[in-house]
Image (cartoon, rainbow, N blue to C red):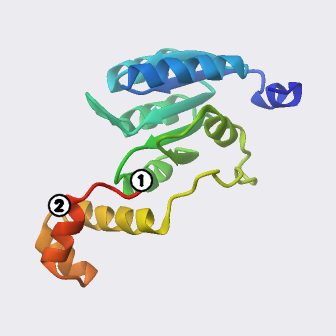
């Protein structure tokens, strides 16, 4: 971490991390503290909203899928309490559509899991007119196709026949794709 990078964090170094994966949350909190942030963590929507309300941070990294609900609720609370906060949303499998919704709700950017501390720091510190550098390991074309199919499937309320019709593919072909694990 260079002195220049610490300077770009700004005067308010408060960072809220919300994720229900406790080992990941601890590792990320340590890594972000080493980069100069003052970190608070929460493992639930309720905990994230409580911190966002009591002490709205300048920065936040929020997982979308939490055990007690949707991370978008934390994004919404934070946006109300601190409109200038830089919020990064972490998405897991099949959640690109939700990530787009998160950006529309006020998140600054989104990253697919697994994201490391360097990716998260770059996204948090990117200015509005400057894009963060491209990821080291972008999604493969197969993964992008799979994400698109998942998105349409979710938008069709998990109706296989309707999804197959909209994607112009055979229903059994779609069922085979949905039964497989996501490609890397």
The residue drawn where x is 64% and y is 23% is 32
Q: Which residue is mark 1?
A: 101
- The crowding category of the residue bearing disc 2, from other C-alpha atoms within 10 Å (few below 14, some 14 to 19, many at least 20), is few
Task: Judge from the rendering whether residue 173 lies leftward or rightward of residue 73; answer left or right.
Answer: left
Q: Quarter of the image holding residue 70?
A: top left
Q: Looking at the rendered structure, which numbered label has been put on residue 61? A: none
Residue 121 in sight: yes
- The crowding category of the residue bearing disc 1, from other C-alpha atoms within 10 Å (few below 14, some 14 to 19, many at least 20), is few
**Foreground: 1 or 158?**
1
Position of residue 117 relative to residue 165, above or below, is: above
Image quadrant occupied by the C terminus: bottom left
Q: Looking at the rendered structure, which numbered label has been put on residue 157? A: 2
**Foreground: 56 or 145?**
145
Q: Quarter of the image holding residue 173?
A: bottom left
The local secondary structure at tag 2 comes to: loop
Mark 1 or mark 2: whose residue is earlier in sequence: 1
């Amino acid at each position: 971490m260079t002195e220049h990078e610490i300077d770009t964090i700004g005067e308010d170094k408060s960072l809220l991390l919300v994720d229900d994966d406790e080992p990941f949350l601890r590792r990320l909190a340590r890594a972000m503290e080493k980069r100069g942030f003052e970190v608070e963590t929460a493992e639930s929507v309720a905990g994230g909203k409580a911190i966002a309300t009591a002490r709205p941070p300048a920065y936040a990294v929020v997982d979308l899928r939490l055990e007690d609900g949707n991370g978008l609720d934390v994004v919404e609370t934070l946006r109300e309490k601190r409109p200038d906060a830089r919020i990064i949303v972490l998405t897991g499998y099949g959640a690109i559509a939700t990530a787009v919704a998160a950006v529309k709700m006020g998140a600054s950017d989104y990253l697919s899991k697994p994201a490391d501390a360097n990716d998260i720091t770059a996204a948090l510190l990117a200015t509005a007119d400057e894009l963060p550098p491209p990821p080291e390991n972008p999604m493969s074309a197969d993964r992008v196709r799979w994400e698109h199919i998942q998105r349409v499937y979710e938008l069709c309320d998990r109706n296989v026949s309707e999804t197959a019709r909209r994607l112009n593919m055979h229903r059994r072909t779609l069922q085979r794709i949905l039964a497989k694990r996501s490609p890397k």
